[in-house]
Image (spheres, rainbow, N blue to C red):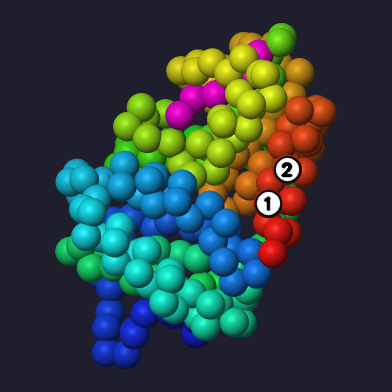
Amino acid sequence: MGRDAITDMEGFELGEPALVCRWRLANRRLPLENRHMRALLARTVNGAPVSTELVAWAKQHIEWTLEQGSAEHPNGVLMLIVDKQGRAAMTVGPFAPLEDVSLMSLVHRAERSATEAEQTGVAPETLWAMCGDGLLWDPVCRKGSSGAASLVLQLSQTLGMDVRIKEGLVEAVANEAIDCSEVFLVSDEHGVVPAMDAAGPFGRRLAQGYQRLLERR
């Protein structure tokens, strides 16, 4: 589980993971904590809804141990792991930016995230596309959106953008079946990531806003 476990891992071993959440830290804090907790509550483990007890446990450990537990990686990634028996642990690891931010690489990430959402109810990474004067996205599962996606949705609407859900967006982008001026990934771990070969001003504006959020003290 790594050296930076923020739970007492001595003598404790998790079984096969059923749920893994990866949340970006900034200066030993979790900037989107409330959004992540709401998204956690919308998830499922082995087909059963995440309990309020698990969410309370996560909030307690973040409050009590995150500052000390993230000392080695203050701007790293907080990982919540729940195994198939419902046992949970938290650990902190280093953050690594995406090496490949091409459109097809982001499409593949969104596809894998959609597959995860089929099991857990929430997609941690979603693809967004600017088409005409509106912004399209596919939350994959209507039960809930990730913490980062809920932030981008609110920011976009605050900026006066017309945001619409389009099922099958990832496939449409991959097959060039839709005319988009820009495409970006929204990720709990990586924030807003404009596609290198399909970047545009709105995605860059959101990415800059997300970065400013991380830099707040």
Q: Residue furthest bottom?
A: 10
Which x, y percent locates residue 150?
51, 36
Q: Is residue 43 placed above or below 142 in the rendered structure?
A: below
- Circle 2: is it few (<14), some (14-19), or many (20+) Cα within 10 Å? some
Q: Is residue 157 visible?
A: yes
Q: In what element is the residue under mark 1?
A: helix
Q: Residue at x 68, y 51 (%)?
A: 213
Q: Residue at x 69, y 64 (%)?
A: 217
Which x, y percent locates residue 77?
56, 65
Which x, y percent locates residue 98?
68, 53
Q: Any magenta on residue 81?
A: no
Question: Is label 2 in contact with label 1 (beta carbons under 8 Å)?
Answer: yes
Q: How many marks?
A: 2
On the rendered structure, is 188 left or right of 20?
A: right
Residue 216's quadrant in the figure?
bottom right
Instruction: Determine which residue is flagged by label 2.
Output: 209
Query: Any mark on residue 193, and which?
Result: none
Q: Residue at x 29, y 66 (%)?
A: 57
Considering the whole magenta stretch, tell me its main secondary structure.
strand
Q: Is residue 208 placed above or below 126 in the rendered structure?
A: below
> Which amino acid type is marked by label 1?
Leu
Instruction: Determine which residue is flagged by label 1.
Output: 213
Quadrant, the N terminus: bottom left
On the rendered structure, is 114 left or right of 188?
A: left
Q: Which residues are magenta?
A: 134-139
Residue 80's quadrant in the figure?
bottom left
Q: In what element is the residue under mark 2?
A: helix
